[in-house]
Amino acid sequence: MKNEGFKFLKTILFFAFLFVFVNVAKADYPATLNSISVTGNTGLANTNT
C-alpha cells in the first residue's frame, strides 16, 4: 500500500514537472528566438558595413 502511494506521488510530480517545463518552454521560446535573430541580424549588419 505504501509503495502504491509513492508511485502515485511520483506520477503526480512527473506531470507537474512536465506541465511547468512545457509552460516555461512556451514562454521562453519566442524570446530566445528573437534574441538569436537579433544577434544574427546585427552580426550581418556589422559584417556588411
Image (tube, rainbow, N blue to C red):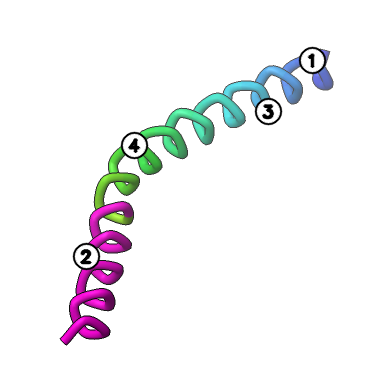
Residues at marks 4 and 2, CA–CA distance in whole angstroms: 19 Å
Mark nearer the viewer, 2 or 3: 2
Q: The magenta stretch spans which residues?
A: 33-49
Label 2 Cα crowd, 10 Å radius (few <14 / some 14-19 / many 20+): few
Mark nearer the viewer, 4 or 3: 4
User: Circle 4 sits on which residue?
Assistant: 26
At x 16% / y 87%, what residue is drawn? Answer: 49
Element at badge 1? helix
At x 31% / y 48%, what residue is drawn? Answer: 28
User: Circle 1 sits on which residue?
Assistant: 4
Residues at marks 2 and 3, CA–CA distance in whole angstroms: 41 Å
Tag 4 and tag 2, C-beta contact below 8 Å: no
Q: Is residue 30 left or right of residue 3?
A: left
Badge 1 or badge 2: first in the primary sequence: 1
Mark nearer the viewer, 1 or 4: 4
Badge 4 or badge 2: first in the primary sequence: 4
Label 4 Cα crowd, 10 Å radius (few <14 / some 14-19 / many 20+): few
Badge 4 or badge 3: first in the primary sequence: 3
Amino acid beneath label 1: Glu
Residues at marks 1 and 4, CA–CA distance in whole angstroms: 33 Å
User: Circle 3 sits on which residue?
Assistant: 10
Which quarter of the image is occupied by the N terminus?
Answer: top right
At x 28% / y 41%, what residue is drawn? Answer: 27
Amino acid beneath label 3: Lys
**Residue 36 spot, x, y in % from top left:** 32, 62
Amino acid beneath label 2: Val
Task: Give the image quarter of residue 9.
Answer: top right
Label 3 Cα crowd, 10 Å radius (few <14 / some 14-19 / many 20+): few
Badge 1 or badge 3: first in the primary sequence: 1
Amino acid beneath label 4: Lys
Mark nearer the viewer, 1 or 2: 2
Residues at marks 4 and 3, CA–CA distance in whole angstroms: 24 Å
